[in-house]
Amino acid sequence: MSLYIPEGIPPVIPNAMARIERRLPYPGEVLVRQGSRVEPEDIVAQTLKPEPPQIINVARSLGIPPSQVYRAMSREVHNKVEAGQVLARTAGIFGRSCLAPVTCMIADIDNETGYVTIAPDPTEYALQATVRGIVMEVIPYEGVIIEAPSAQVYGAFGIGEDRSGVLRLLATDPGDIVRPEQIDARSAYAILICGAGISAAALRRAVQEQVRGIIVGGVDESELRDFLGWANVAGWQTGRHSWQWPDLTATATPDPKLTILVTEGFGTRPMNAAMFDLLSSQDRQEALIEGATRLRRPLRRPRVVIPLTRNSSVQVEPPHPALRPGASVRLLDYAHLGKIAQVRSVPSAPRRVASRVSLAAVEVVDADGVAFWLPRTCVEVLS
């Protein structure tokens, strides 16, 4: 079991039953029953999503003192106003008007400041299944859990909402760098399989071409900051308890309309061969990409779920391969990140590694036949 993968699930699962949890952001109505078969575009639940209140400076709009705002109002507190209707108006033939920007309810009128607070009507929110499968559990007023026999790939970290699309292979080799000109109209509504890296320009081009998701081995932090508009935001936070995104309290970052899954980490990192081979074999198949990353309980890793058409030998539970001699492992240390090796020995006694620290270690052999020792926390069992 790796320190980075405390649940012991391997990053590449060729064939197992996937459980996909779909939850509403607010309590609402579930539209499907247990046992229902759903498609990616099917609506499984719906709710009303409240909008944040808006504050309007009515006194400045009308050019009157704040104390006169209450008399100028055409509606009282708790009254509803349609978008474009007169919210307040000054007297006279040439009186000035203040119109409601949205359909709303008047929440408060402040005679001391001249501000009027309005509460916009909630918007309808529809929750899609995003994957083809069967509803195995209904969570009342919240959502559903869908199961589907699938191939699955887990990443290191991700960004963005859950989105579905068709896999499209852009890289011919795990070490390829995707260029903006490679992303064209044929990539619309697709989840692109990339190689070792991608630039901010290519990510912006992907949004322009309505790409649903990006699967890539690595991405430079500067390129990711550029794409997300985080140039002036505090850096990434690491610590003993968890890892966090930059502090976004001072910057309102809109949804980038693109889900990014990074399989290896920051920098130019070739995607490991096992992941690339599995994804390549599923080219032009429907898939679900989940970008949420949570390192605190309950843990959640970003993943790609690819429903399989043939499920005769599907495993009910994901495999939990043991760390043993002969096992295929993925290396997680800085010098060998993403490489595949084979375990030669797993001694029970502590062993001194390259850093000259004695700890629980494992001896591995890489593709070139070179043997070396690594901490057990630096390997991830594939099979």
Image (spheres, rainbow, N blue to C red):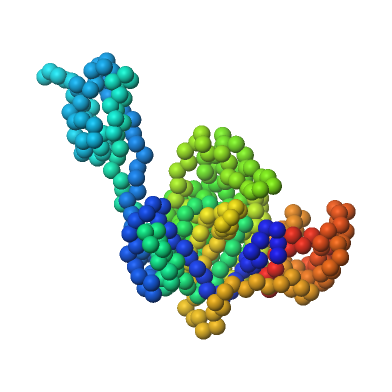
Residue closer to the observer: 209 or 307: 307
As drawn, the residue found furthest toward the left would be: 93
Q: Is residue 110 above or below residue 18?
A: above
Name the outermost residue toward the front.
140
144 or 247, nearer to the observer: 144
Q: Is residue 119 left or right of residue 353?
A: left
Residue at (66%, 66%) from the top-left corner? 8
Q: Is residue 161 left or right of residue 380?
A: left
Identified at 63% across, 48% down, the residue is 243
Which image quarter is the N terminus in? bottom right
User: On the image, which quarter does residue 59 sit in?
Assistant: top left
Point out residue 135 in the picture as x, y percentages from the top left corner: 41, 71
Q: Residue 137 versus residue 338: which sits nearer the camera? A: 137
Of the pair 210 and 88, the residue shown nearer to us: 88
Q: Position of residue 27 (x, y in %)?
A: 37, 54
Q: Quadrant of the C terminus?
A: bottom right
* Residue 96 found in image quarter: top left
Q: Residue at x 57, y 74 (%)?
A: 317
Q: Percent from the top left, x then y, of residue 66?
A: 28, 18
- Say whether residue 182 is visible: no
Residue depicted at x 33% and y 59%:
29
Q: Quadrant of residue 357?
A: bottom right
Judged from this view, the residue extending furthest toward the top is 65
44 vs 202: above or below = below
Provide residue 375's location: percent of width, then percent of height: 79, 60
